Image: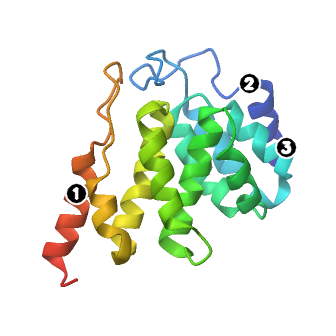
Amino acid sequence: MISLAFGMVISGNWQPRSRPITSWRSLSGKPEMSTHSFWAVLLMKPENLSATEMDRTVRSVTFAHVADWLNSYVVKNHSDKETLREKWLTGKSPWAARAGWSLTAERVAKDAERLDLPAILDRIESEMADAAPEVQWTMNAGLAGIGIHHSKHRQRASIATIPSPKDAPHPLPQSGSTKWCVGKLQRNRNF
């Protein structure tokens, strides 16, 4: 079953031509997925994929929901995720960058000891405006994670701005979302 799932990904048969779910659209606005995409992700076992296969799989995704499932259920459990995270953050593929920022957000929340949080904030501030919408979403997750989990950097994270492209098919998080998250936490807990 695992080889079937990986074969579906590599062959491009994530989205069979029959009966796509047309109410879900990729960021380009075209219908691009079916339940087979999710099924393939759920069949994958991270321990059976090499780093090269994982990289190819992440780069083959063309739909945000599938990318998020892949990142949550497969990529975050892969043994080479840190090496891949570093590689994906420096590449040109928006889907690889999305996975890299998703892993960064996870590290920010769970294991930030060896992360340079000021450098991550610098990068978010300098790159977010020009980043692809696919990437902005997960960059914002890293930004919110810094604001929520690291009080030393909370003020800086709460004032970072996140522009929204005019042609986005759905609203993207604005700077207010981070401010809202941090403000809500501050009201609900005594920081």
Residue at 20% x, 57% y is 180
The picture quadrant where one finds residue 190 is: bottom left
**Are circles 2 and 3 on residues that touch, CB within 8 Å?**
no
Question: Which comes before the other along the chain, label 2 or label 3?
Answer: 3
SS of the residue at dot 2? loop
Q: In screen coordinates, is 2 left or right of 60?
A: right
Against 69, residue 28 (above or below) is above
Q: Is residue 76 left or right of residue 178?
A: right
Give the x, y percent position of residue 13.
Answer: 72, 25
The residue that disc 1 covers is 179
- The single residue placed furthest to the bottom in the displayed view is 190
The residue at 62%/50% (across/down) is: 100
Q: Is residue 5 visible?
A: no
The crowding category of the residue bearing disc 3, from other C-alpha atoms within 10 Å (few below 14, some 14 to 19, many at least 20), is some
N-term-proximal mark, 1 vs 3: 3
Q: Residue at x 77, y 43 (%)?
A: 55
Q: Secondary structure at mark 3?
A: helix
154 is higher (above) or lower (below) than 120: below
Residue 69: x %, y % from top left: 55, 47
Q: What kind of residue is marked 1?
A: Lys
Q: Furthest-left residue in view? A: 187
Q: Is residue 107 left or right of residue 49?
A: left
Residue at label 2? 12
Q: Which residue is mark 3?
A: 3
Residue 184: quadrant of the picture: bottom left
Residue 142: which disc? none
| Marks 1 and 3, how far apart at CA | 44 Å
